[in-house]
Image: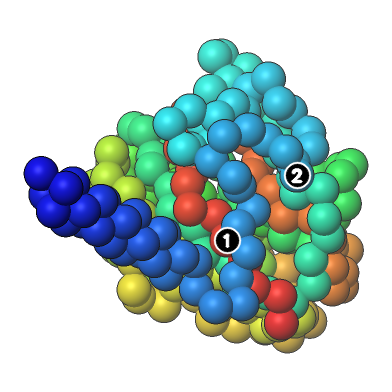
Amino acid sequence: MKTLKCIFFIFLSGFAIATSSAQNKSLEPGFTSLFNGKDLDGWVGNKESYRTENGMIVIDPQGGGGGNLYTEKEYGNFILHFEFQLTPGANNGLGIHAPLEGDAAYVGKELQILDNRAKKYAELQTYQYHGSVYGVIPARRGFLKPVGEWNQQTVIVNHPKIKVILNGTTILEGDYLEASKDGTLDHKEHPGLERSSGHIGFLGHGDVVHFRNIRIKEL
């Protein structure tokens, strides 16, 4: 009987070690998590429309615009990994190098998060589709997973260069200062293109979107 108990204890110990090892491997070397999976510690902004649920950050504006949720910390050059799940027709954005006030698409930079396949978006400008630097650099289309499935996205920023990888495919790579030197595609002023650091945030536009596994490596 004692032998069986000993074997069972060794089995449990080994299982715990293996589980712990797997969890540690989930966070790549040099990366830190921006979301603890439980609450919005480390984030500032609209904590009413944004909530935590089952290890996710969920934006659920319930008829409102949703507002923005930003990291407390500011970041300059970085590699950002995150996963997102769209709902039909969903529109959101990833703000980078943003201050806490003003429209991040202009006073910082906004990377579109959008259900490209929705009929209501069929006539958008090229710089408005998913992954684009809004108003400045258009992204390639056709690499989003069907609505309801999880997408994996990596954003690499080394001011003024930027690269966006969606589900393993590079959909955008460029220099936003070079791209805007003769004027932006939306013909508007984007003073935030000059910013080399700021907050990272999710920019609500009235739709439900889920986020998880948000982690960053500073360069």
In the picture of the structure, the residue carrying the numbered disc 2 is 42
Contact, mark 1 vs mark 2 (Cβ under 8 Å): no
Taking the image as drawn, is residue 193 in sight?
Answer: no
Taking the image as drawn, is residue 84 in sight?
Answer: yes
Provide residue 149's location: percent of width, then percent of height.
27, 45
- In this rendering, is residue 23 above or below 31? above
Which disc number belongs to residue 100?
A: none
Judged from the image, the secondary structure of the residue bearing numbered disc 1 is strand
Judged from the image, the secondary structure of the residue bearing numbered disc 2 is loop
Q: Residues within 10 Å of mark 1 (few under 14, many from 20)?
A: many
Provide residue 47's location: percent of width, then percent of height.
71, 26
Provide residue 79's location: percent of width, then percent of height.
61, 74
Q: Quadrant of residue 101?
A: top right
> Which residue is painted at 54% across and 41% down in the image?
37
In the picture of the structure, the residue carrying the numbered disc 1 is 215
At label 2, the amino acid type is Gly
Cα separation, mark 1 vs mark 2, equals 13 Å
At label 1, the amino acid type is Arg
